[in-house]
Image: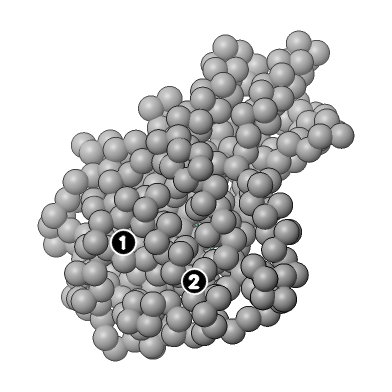
Amino acid sequence: MAVYNFNAGPAALPLPVLKKAQEELVNFRGSGMSIMEMSHRSKAYDEVHNQAIQLLKEVMEIPDTHEVLFLQGGASLQFAMVPMNFLHSGQKAGYVLTGSWSEKAKKEADSIGQTEVAGSSKENLYRHIPSNDELQLSDEFAYLHVTSNNTIYGTQWHEFPHLSVPLIADMSSDILSRKIDVSQFSLVYAGAQKNLGPSGVTVVIAEKKLLENANKDIPKILSYQTHSSSNSLYNTPPTYSIYMLSLVLEWSKEHGGLDGLQKQNEKKADLIYQCLDEHSEFYLPHSRKDSRSLMNVTFNLQNEDLTKAFLKEASERGFTGLNGHRSIGGCRASIYNAVPMESCEALVGFMEEFRKKH
Ligand SMILES: *Cc1c(COP(=O)(O)O)cnc(C)c1O
């Protein structure tokens, strides 16, 4: 039976990437051993490491004002590192609340310094991204933090606020899925396990100027400066995850880079949203139309029994990962870069069939 992988994270990886990794697994490019078994100071690993950085710069068109870091601890460690480094005493950081991850990011910052809610769609069950008019911005903020794509609620920023203070974004679930202007952000971070590769590495894209103004009185290992000044080789990096990231980036390039991937992602998402909209008496999308995510399509059925039946039948038919996040339930199709069009077509076929039957 074919398996259609809609897992939310860790998530689908491109099949050609897995095959290449398999091919190189026990004998990395003629070295007679696996890349996993090599020193992170070896020449072979160094090439992989620097290639991953170069490829990310190329694919995302990262300007020279910014640099790429490979860290660990997931996006969750960034929730703490961002305020530790950039929330100076006497200042406030602004957080826009658009879902569970932004709430967590703010909570972590609250334990380090002062924060302020600069906008929230919580009252609307996080169905939308606040518009510019709904934001309460201040020139005094140390930075403004946003979550570009809300993995659990299925919403996505389509236009980011322009500000005089540093803009910092958690892009864990939509990095590499569409064109963005990196120069608009002072810092971007993303755990790899949605669009970039396997879990283990966290990508940070930081403006050099921002790093210069970071707090100095924090543990070395938690300072961006430490990792920046050692090319992310201060301690042993997650070498295998970075190797996988470099393969995913090569694959992304072959698929037309961000332009190509964005077009494909739009087609995939349109297909599923169209099905939801055409049968809005049966399928109930969670997010407001103007805030819909290209990565996570969230919806409910009219009642819990029907939702249960949908998920059960779907799983019997080879669809995995369609259950919503444990915190909100319902259904969610995560359609990251590596999820092929055919999986989306198969899902829509199943949704039509299920609707007719019930
Ligand atoms: C998955 C996810 C996280 C959590 O990432 P970890 O790597 O598990 O810490 C944070 N933010 C967003 C937007 C996510 O999608």
User: Relative to residue 244, is residue 301 depicted above or below?
Assistant: above
Give the residue at x 24% y 69%: 208
Image side of residue 18 versus residue 139, left or right: right
From the image, state whether disc 2 or disc 1 is nearer to you: 2
Amino acid residing under circle 2: Glu
Q: Secondary structure at mark 2?
A: helix
Front in this rendered view, residue 49 or 358: 49
Q: Residue furthest front?
A: 30
* Residue 197 percent across, percent down from the top left: 58, 56
* Residue 58 percent across, percent down from the top left: 37, 53
Q: Secondary structure at mark 1?
A: strand
Q: Quadrant of residue 316?
A: top right
Image side of residue 45 versus residue 356, left or right: left
* Numbered badge on residue 50: none
User: Relative to residue 112, is residue 127 depicted above or below?
Assistant: above
Give the residue at x 35% y 62%: 205
Give the residue at x 25% y 56%: 63
Amino acid residing under circle 1: Leu
Q: Is residue 93 visible?
A: no
Front in this rendered view, residue 197 or 254: 254
Image side of residue 292 versus residue 85, left or right: right
Q: Residues within 10 Å of mark 2 (few under 14, many from 20)?
A: few
Residue that carries the numbered disc 2 in the rendered image: 47
Pick whichever of labels 2 and 1 is earlier in the sequence.
2
Q: Quadrant of residue 231?
A: bottom left
Residue that carries the numbered disc 1 in the rendered image: 187
Give the residue at x 56% y 42%: 336
Front in this rendered view, residue 46 or 298: 46
